[in-house]
Amino acid sequence: MAFDLRIHTGSSTPIFRQIVDQVRLASATGRLAPGDPLPSVRALAERLLVNPNTIAKAYAELARDRIIETHQGKGVFVAEQARDVYTLAERQRRLSPAVDALAREALALGFSLEQVQEMLGKRLRQLGKEEG
Amino acid sequence: MAFDLRIHTGSSTPIFRQIVDQVRLASATGRLAPGDPLPSVRALAERLLVNPNTIAKAYAELARDRIIETHQGKGVFVAEQARDVYTLAERQRRLSPAVDALAREALALGFSLEQVQEMLGKRLRQLGKEEG
Amino acid sequence: MAFDLRIHTGSSTPIFRQIVDQVRLASATGRLAPGDPLPSVRALAERLLVNPNTIAKAYAELARDRIIETHQGKGVFVAEQARDVYTLAERQRRLSPAVDALAREALALGFSLEQVQEMLGKRLRQLGKEEG
Amino acid sequence: MAFDLRIHTGSSTPIFRQIVDQVRLASATGRLAPGDPLPSVRALAERLLVNPNTIAKAYAELARDRIIETHQGKGVFVAEQARDVYTLAERQRRLSPAVDALAREALALGFSLEQVQEMLGKRLRQLGKEEG
DNA sequence: GTGGTCTAGACCACT
DNA sequence: GTGGTCTAGACCACC
């Protein structure tokens, strides 16, 4: 199964960030395993109809964070490095900025806890399906 | 207690947006009450060491959303009544980027829906209590 | 026919508002169709002989109201679908200054309600027909 | 009966303009007849709780347009000048900017002719009552 | 004094 | 190339 990278040009999040996030997410959830090949810059640019510079920028950030490795003349692969294991506290610490941002925005827009939880549940189920 | 506006110039979120968000949240939680005066454009610009235009831009957005009212020659005040400016669909559209960001991050970190919802509830209660 | 934006620098209505109003009206009457590109900030500024910031301010307001979509590095386009952003009450609030002005003027000039309504209907039909 | 001038500080229209418009309207509809006295600058400023400069500015514009006359030491009076008589075409020409502004705004906000006509009728009835 | 608009010119992120 | 943000400084209307 080919790793199915998708971008939304309508979104306000930059294309290069969408790519970085998807690869990072796929790697964290095991959908991409160490050693798996990724499409070349040129091939991905053609498939997604975006500028090769955009792909290169995304791959550069992923390589900097040791998520992927590029082997000259061979291609791009998911890095072999050991997966970090976080404590619960550490995982919560990493999640809390997003929790905080959503909480503030929801309050400002006048949403109740229940409404936000429902939107969140719906979105999580969507993401889960795309992954499976 | 005077309303204590603070900005981080090091942040990637624009200064004017930091101001908008803080005022909106303070208004939603009741920390700013209808009729309360806000610092003048020039005074706030001096205090925060930013350009008056930046403050004016923030105030203009708040006025468009009917959070504040500006009176020529008098100053800026918190709007008398909270008003339903945006449709439910629009408010959901505005919340969805934060929902999406949290959902993706939670998935990548391996949290369950219930765990995230609990963190969210806790944070919402904290923010609501920070009044006065 | 390219969309022909024109401003009157002599007018008391701000330049950025003239631009906003013309684009909004053109979008509402279908003279601008979803997906249509708008001139770039710099190009329009050059053509109208105004500062790019003034154009940017107008485009920012149109984007907030989801009339247009701006794509970083690509340009500005008419939004894909018209969306209900504002509640009925808010739309009435925004219309009421114009209603009030016409009512007062009509009263001062001794027009009956029927006469004003007829003039209004005629003008609305004219504006609607000026498409294409 | 004293001429009952009222201002809305919450409105976006400047106070001095509200005063000018109300006097002009009362004069045009005969509620203020030539020779009728108006309150002094100082008295009106005290009654409306506004700055005397604001009243003075309004009276200056009314005097410039020959709606009122100020007699030093005696007070302010509605001018004796002959009322202009307009042809229907001339009256329509004077009304048309307000008609046009309302039509454009209504179209942009997505209102139907019927909705606008209803808002207009309601507003005209309100103004008629205030006057009676 | 207040806020609103505009110009000029700079820097940054994204494509 | 594109739009987004910020600074500096000016002028205006209103109170």
Image: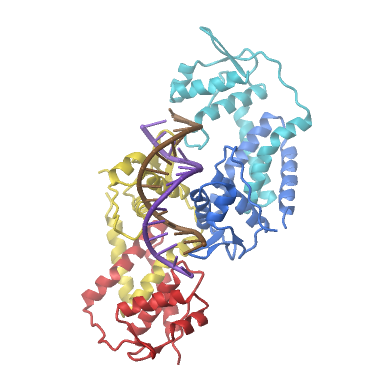
Chain colours: A cyan, B blue, C yellow, D red, E brown, F purple
**Residue C111 appearing in the image:** no
Q: Compared with residue C35, is residue A78 higher up or lower down, i.e. above or below?
A: above
The C terminus of chain D appears in which quarter of the rendering? Answer: bottom left
Q: Residue at x 73, y 45 (%)?
A: B123
Identify which residue is drawn at 55% across, 58% down.
Answer: B40
Q: Nearer the viewer, residue C91 or D67?
A: D67
The picture places residue C131, in percent across and down from the top left corner, at 28, 52
Q: Is residue D130 visible?
A: yes
Q: Residue furthest top?
A: A73
Q: Quadrant of the N terminus of chain D?
A: bottom left
* Residue E9 point in image, percent of width and height: 39, 38
* Image quadrant where residue C103 sits: bottom left
Indicate whether A68 appears above or below D54.
above
Residue A21, percent from left and from top: 59, 28
Residue A65, position as x, y percentages in the image: 62, 21
In depth, the one of E3 and A22 nearer the eye is E3
- Does F2 sit left or right of C8 as displayed? right
